[in-house]
Amino acid sequence: MTMKTLSLLVVDDDPVIRLLLCQRLTKDNHMVSAVDKGQDALGLLRGDAQFDALITDLVLPDMDGIAVLEVAKSLRPTIEALVITGHASVDSAVEAMKKGAVDYLTKPINFDELSLRLDHIAIRQGLAKDARDILLAKEVTEQEAASTIQALEMRVSELQDALTAAAAILRDGGRDQEDKISQALAILNRT
Amino acid sequence: MLKITAGEIKTVSQYIKDISGIYLDASKGYLLETRLSPLAEALDCKNYSELQHKASRDASKKIERQIIDAISTNETLFFRDKGPFELLQYKLLPELIDARSGGALKRQLRVWSAASSTGQELYSVAIVIRELLQGNLGKYNFHLLGTDISDNAVQQASYGKYNKFEIERGLDQAVLRKYFTAFGDSWKVRDELRAMVKFQKFNLMQPFTGLGKFDIILCRNVAIYFTMDDRKKLFAKLADSLADDGFLVIGSTESLTGICSRFEPKRHLRSIFYQKK
């Protein structure tokens, strides 16, 4: 069972595979946008829609799947990518992994295997979100603490300066006692 | 996970303090367990005392380095706290550049990230300098040094490669594209930025001999791991290493009250910086 609903962008020019992918992924509770051309995928990635993962065939009619992957990663650095390769070519899979794909699948697609890979992506993204939430909470706490500490730091510095000035006046041997006390008190009262 | 005894917490903590300055009190037994257990098990140690003995007897100091790597906290991010980088961009760097300008020779401007961890802080400083000076960078002679006690941290900082989670934290897309190159699922700092910085291993507990004077010192969120006595010694040495008109920046939740009276706090916008009195 899938851990979290993922927003997926599927790129495959084979209408049957595209349909099967849409049916299975929707059944697994994911949201799917499917296109048959690399340029259409990049158009969607340049738009406002949010995608958690890209699933792309390596062989597309208008451009190389690895090029789609590269542009997708540059447009959306956090997007996860799975590539589909028509033959068990280690070279193309390694090339795709080098360009940022997290995994690859070979045709014919084993849908249970695909679900498993997407589960892993969902778990990883869930953990990443938890980590981000914790960091955000930490940063908010730090900002509050910083604001208080910095105000205190400045205040302590001012008080130290005033005490030093008052002490200097009180230590001045050549002046009237009452005058010194009154001047020292005036400094302390101003602070 | 190997369980640590109360006696071991005391002796191992003392050993860690001796080699790194990092002080872990009696309540930090869990931290010693979670961070040192994998190393102890990998070295077939039956307990933490054995790990400590092995480390002490290891002439190559490899185990000592592994313990420091495991115990040091490398929590950092690009442009951490934002405020100090605005401070650098709008106050400290312009003032320093102004003070060091004039004369036939290019004067050095030295910046030290004293606990540089995996490098994000110093690269952020380098980005601020490039953004500030744009095409005029060549007119100035910037030296940016990052030091850390952890070999692993220094190695990653020098290599300048960050995974997407590290990149996500603190960097906006425009800066990312301008100063980083995609490298598989990670990102690598571009050469022009990497050429501006130098990282080396350094233990802040040791004398600062040979480091010279710096115009800006960033010593953020590291002294919090030291005892009060060691903090006092550290900031006294930092005062000696700072140029008379130089600037010290500490962590946003840190304070020098009661630690070092040679510095005076000054406020600019949302941040505090320190100058020598």
Image (cartoon, coloured by chain):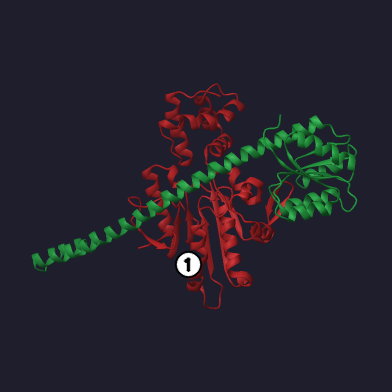
Residue B265: image location, x then y, percent? 37, 59
**In the rendered structure, the residue with mark 1 lies on which chain?**
B
B127 vs B16: above or below: below
Q: Position of B266 compared to B177: left or right? A: left
Q: Position of A120 compared to A36: left or right? A: left
Front position in the image: B234 or A31 = A31
For image coordinates 48% across by 41% down, the residue present is B20
Rendered red, the chain in question is B
Residue B122: image location, x then y, percent? 56, 56
Residue B52: image location, x then y, percent? 51, 29
Look at the numbered disc 1 and give the secondary structure of its residue: helix
Front position in the image: B173 or B84 = B173
Quadrant in the picture for the N terminus of chain A = top right
Mark 1 closeness class: few <14, some 14–19, many ≥20 residues within 10 Å:
some
Quadrant in the picture for the C terminus of chain A = bottom left
Write down the colour of chain A: green
Q: Which residue is mark 1?
A: B91
B275 vs A12: above or below: below
Q: Quadrant of residue B70 in the image? A: top right
Residue B199: image location, x then y, percent? 59, 53
For image coordinates 62% across by 37% down, the residue present is A127
Q: Quadrant of residue A54 in the image? A: top right
